[in-house]
Structure formats: C-alpha cells, structure tokens
Amino acid sequence: MKSGKARAVGVANFNADQMRRIADHLARAGVPLAANQVNYSLLRRAAETNGVLEACRELDVALVAYFPLASGRLTQPSDSMGTKALLTCLADIARAHDASISQVALNWLLARDSHVIPIPGATKPHHARANLHALGWRLSETEFDAIDRTREWYWSDPERHRVGRLELAWARGEVVRRALVELGVDDEDLARRIGDTYHSLRDDAIRPFDDAVPTVQWLRGQGCRLALLTNGASKMQRLKINRFDLAPLFDAILIEGEVGFGKPDPRIYTQALATLDVAAEDAWMVGDNLEWDVAGPQREGIAGIWIDARGRGVPSGHPVRPHRVIGRLSDLRRDDSG
C-alpha cells in the first residue's frame, strides 16, 4: 500500500468487527476495503446472523460467497429431510425457469443482497457456461420467500426445534453427521469431534450487537422494567449472560431450560408479565422472530416489535403484523409516534 500499487484490498473469513477495524485502517492509507470472502450458501447462512452481511452493507463491501453450492450438496440427492425438502423446492423453481438446481441456488444468492457475489467452481468450460445461466433472470419475490421458508424446515416443527435448542451441541453434531454421510463418510466419532469444535468456536465468537447493551441501559434509565426471555438450555444461556454481565440489566431473566417452557409458549409471556408486575397492554416484546417475538406476545395482548435486521420488510402475505418494525435495537430510542 505504501508504494501506491494497491488500489483496493480484499480479505477472507473476517468477522464484522475485524472488517470494521481493517476498513478504518485502510481508509487512513486512502485504500478501500473491497471484499470479504466467506462461506455462504443456502445451507450455510451464518453471514446473515453474525453481522458480516450487515457490515458489508454498512461499509459498501462485496461479500464474495465461496462454496455457494455448499460443496456440491446443492447439486446431488440428499438423505437429510431438510436438504431434501430444499432441493425439491429448488427443482420446482428450476423447471419454471428452464434452469438447473445449482443455477437457482446461485440466483438466490444474487437476489439475497446486491453486495453478494457468488464464486462457484468451474473446472470445465461447460461448468462456466452453466454458471452464466444463473444471470439474466431473477427469482420472483414469491419464489425467493418459498426457498427461505423451505430452508427453515428443520426449525419449523415446534418439538424438533425445542429438542434441538435444548441440546444444541448434540444438534450441531447431528448436522455434521448427516453432512458426512452425504459425502460418503459414516464416522460418528469424527462428526461429534467436528460438531463439538464448531460449537465451541461459534459460542466463543458470540458478541452482543454494538447498540444492544447501551440501548438496554437507556431503557432502564427511562424507568422501564425489563425481562430477558431466551430459549435454550440453562447452562449455555447462563454462560452467555454471565460472560457479558447482562443480569444486572434486567429485572427478570426467564430461560427455557430453567422454567420448563419457552417462546412461543404463551406461559413464558404471562410469567414475564407477572414477574414484572405489569399489564399486557403496558408491555412491549422486542425481537427478530415474527412468530416468537411478535405473534406469540400479540396473542397475549402484548405489543410486538420486530427487528428487521435484513431490511426486507414483513414477507408478502405473511399473517403477522408487528406493532412496529425497526432495523436495530437502538431504533427504540427514536420516537416514531408523529
């Protein structure tokens, strides 16, 4: 950079904080951060929830998606019920566009966000020609939403979801096991080791959003009584609460693994109201899940405020209508009443 030969810089596998730091450092040298290359596909969507995609939007940096076809898992039959349902959905859409499943999967990434650039492999000329056919057409909003809904198949079943989140380390190991089986490797011990390593690394990387704690502190300063409602096992959730010293910020903490039920069970909302000693009509529930944080509370008379971190709005035809939609928790500090 000092010699002036670098006009832009790309990085790989940087998290959101690292992206912001390197972008600031490069800016002082007059060189922009151009791209962050990360593993991103329909079967690997961590970039949407760990802040990387949001940072790409904020910094106007390209998210270069490697393994956009999930290392071939989106191009071949699967024994996993979740992946099988997704492939069926992709195949139906592919027929409507005279395209292949892989072309639909690539088109989904292009439609996901203007900052996303998939880089599929192409070892032969016909691979490159096939990849090009993902351009020149766009998924309709209905098709895009259908793929999103199908991808969430595993977590859509309440009992399957409950078991998975209470035994998250096991669930992650099971996902790895299924993936290895699809690759022709039937080794439960290996799957468990990979799953445990991922579980540990992922949990170590968890951080509150930059505006989260300051906003909660501000709400307390306004005299609001606050409850933290979180699903999952007690040990796992308490570790995070203690790690970030969240307990002093709340008047009540209700953890699924401790009280015996979690969102969207109506008992979790009514218990929160009773613990805080407030009426439903005087309470807000704020979160990023339309069912758990909006519809469930609304059925109990609580106002549901949805955090639309992706900025895509409530899906067309969705039955849930939040009382308010915000992009970040700190938007609560902005008065939208007028």
Image (spheres, rainbow, N blue to C red):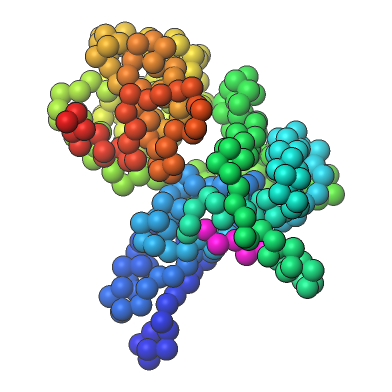
- Residue 294 lies in the magenta-colored region: no
Name which quarter of the figure residue 195 lies in: top right
Magenta segment: 116-120
Up the image or down, 167 lies above or below 111; here it is above
Question: Is any atom of residue 5 visible in this view?
Answer: yes
Name which quarter of the figure residue 177 lies in: top right
Q: Is residue 239 left or right of residue 144?
A: left
Q: Which residue lies at the image location 59% right of the left edge and 52% below the top edge?
A: 138
Q: Which residue lies at the image location 70% right of the left edge and 55% below the top edge?
A: 103
Q: Is residue 109 left or right of residue 272?
A: right
Quadrant showing the N terminus: bottom left
Question: Is any atom of residue 178 visible in this view?
Answer: no
Up the image or down, 265 lies above or below 84; here it is above
Seen from the viewer's position, the closer of residues 317 and 106 is 317
Q: Which residue lies at the image location 42% right of the left edge and 37% below the top edge?
A: 313
Q: Which residue lies at the image location 73% right of the left edge and 35% below the top edge?
A: 85
Q: Is residue 216 left or right of residue 193?
A: left
Residue 176 in percent (x, y) is at 70, 43
Give the prevailing secondary structure in the magenta stretch: strand
Seen from the viewer's position, the closer of residues 93 and 65 is 93
